[in-house]
Image: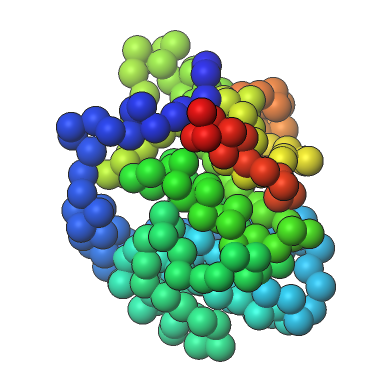
Amino acid sequence: MSPINNAELHQPCLPSQREVQVFYDLAYRQRGLADLPPIYRRIIRLLQPIPGRTLLDVACGEGHLVSYAHEAKLLPTGIDLSSEAIHRARARCPQAMLIVSAGEALPFRDASFDYVTNLGSLEHFRDMDRGLREMARVLAPDGTACLVLPNGFWLGDVLEVFWRGECSSESQVIERHSTRQGWQQLLGTHGFLAHRILRYNRPYPLFAGSTWKVKSIRKFIWRRLFNALTPFNLSLEFIYLCRKRPTPLSAFSSAK
């Protein structure tokens, strides 16, 4: 599969920024949008953070990663299009700077942050190319970026299509997927060099909620086994640890 480009972003049916904002405000108000805590802790460990340095979480949602960054003694900033998400993030981590704004127009100076993160959100941007260029712009020359992106060929979806002829995965107002190499090429085109790629298969929790009620042990074991045996290129998502490319490849194409 070729990397995704802006050709598909200019579809007549692409919702407006206001429509996207309304969608996410409602989603956060009704059910929230967050992953399980292990992924946020893992991202912080992968960044190998140096206390006192700055981190920007683009599309920060409810502020989970921002909160863990603060615990790691970083100086965190979060930005999200949804005012409801930022409201929740402020309650979770009042020490962080939290701003309502689109990821395609970051209100920060060049090279402002030592770490930039974007977890499971780029694929929902109206303009992914511009969002990537903005993240690369605000990243310090010696900084580290971490992006989590979805696989268009996750084994679970492939098996579901094989058996049922359709996939029941939930979609958001804008939804895109690509392959491991497809995402890597897109990142490289817009300012990033991926020096490490890891797989991420969402864990199945053993306990349910704050009651510590044990969930199905059989499902827990099956999910852990399924994740362990999933081939790398058929993983649910990929974690890209990136450095800043001195000159984005898109700069050469736009100069022609």
Please determine whether, in this image, residue 47 is positioned above or below residue 230.
below
Q: Quadrant of residue 154?
A: top right
Please determine whether, in this image, residue 190 is positioned above or below residue 71.
above
Q: Residue 116, position in %: x, y?
A: 62, 60
- The outermost residue toward the bottom is 95
Lateral position of residue 48 relative to residue 211, left or right: right
Lateral position of residue 14 relative to residue 116, left or right: left
Near-viewer residue (159 or 234): 234
Q: Residue 250, position in %: x, y?
A: 55, 36
Q: Quadrant of residue 47?
A: bottom right
Q: Is residue 145 visible?
A: yes
Q: Residue 211, position in %: x, y?
A: 50, 70
Instruction: Name the residue: 36% across, 27% down.
Output: 7
Q: Residue 62, position in %: x, y?
A: 44, 69
Instruction: Name the residue: 44% across, 82% down.
Output: 90
Instruction: Name the residue: 46% across, 64% down.
Output: 106
- The outermost residue toward the front is 256
Lateral position of residue 80 relative to residue 23, left or right: right
Near-viewer residue (41 or 15): 15
Instruction: Name the residue: 63% across, 25% down.
Output: 181
